[in-house]
Amino acid sequence: MKVAILLYPGTWSERDFAHAFGLLGIEHEIVWHADADLHGFDAAIVPGGFSYGDHLRAGAIAKLSPATRELRRAAADGMPILGSCNGFQILCEAGLLPGALVRNTHLEFRCDWVRMRVESEETPFTRGLGGELLRMPIAHGEGCWVADEDTLLRVESSGQVALRYVDERGTATPEANPNGSTANIAGLRNEAGNVLGLMPHPERCVEDLLGGTDGRRMLEGLGARTVIPA
């Protein structure tokens, strides 16, 4: 298993992912967006940060990058792809995931820990974690997932909601929702199950020293799991 960690101008979580994969013993390489060629890699990560300074809106310019064109090709070929925070925003802007991420409803940047319930196991990153409650950190100002009613109905009925914000009892309450995201949605998968986007940062909770290891449970799947067939 060899993982490509894409680096866009303004990205800053690429080294956190590299550290996490190093701990897990998973081969990885940070790849500059303009030189992106995912042939020879088995999976790709779109890390968090502020690609292109979030000008226009988060992910709007990054979706035009050569790296994003390569992501579309790789996704169509079934490559496992994970986008965290700004990576989730880029995947939505690029059309690889439905809906969009907009300004938090309270208009505040939130840096905190949240809980999520795993709603779908149909990704290489959540396989075997169905129904589990995961605790991970967030750091974003535009994490409110929105979509029209038809899209919301489709993602709910097709099982594309992968992660949902919940409280310590596993209940999806308004208080557990850190950004006003529609239906408490914290993460989505594509229909095929090989692309996953989420606002929390799994790469920041892979060792006890950082306050938790639930992110490790998600990332280590790349070392043992294969792509879920469409």
Image (cartoon, helix red, strand yellow):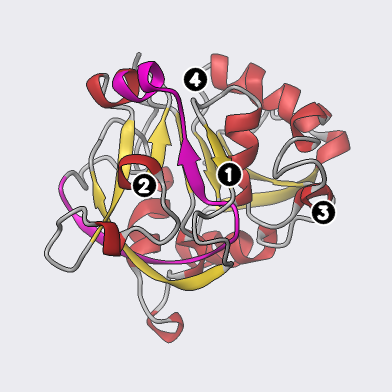
Q: Quadrant of the C terminus?
A: top left
Mark 4, other Cα within 10 Å: few <14 / some 14–19 / many ≥20? some
Q: Do the residues bearing badges 2 and 1 touch, measured as CB atoms within 8 Å?
A: no
Residue that mark 3 sits on: 53
The CA span between labels 2 and 1 is 29 Å
* Residue 102 marker: 1
Of pointers 4 and 2, the one earlier in the residue sequence: 4
Q: Nearer the viewer, residue 183 or 186?
A: 183
Check the image and name the residue furthest to the left: 169
Q: Amino acid at mark 3?
A: Gly
Q: Nearer the viewer, residue 179 or 23?
A: 179
Magenta span contains residue 80: no
What range of the chain is rendered magenta?
Answer: 131-153
The CA span between labels 1 and 4 is 28 Å
For marks 3 and 1, give the one nearer the viewer. Answer: 1
SS of the residue at dot 1? strand
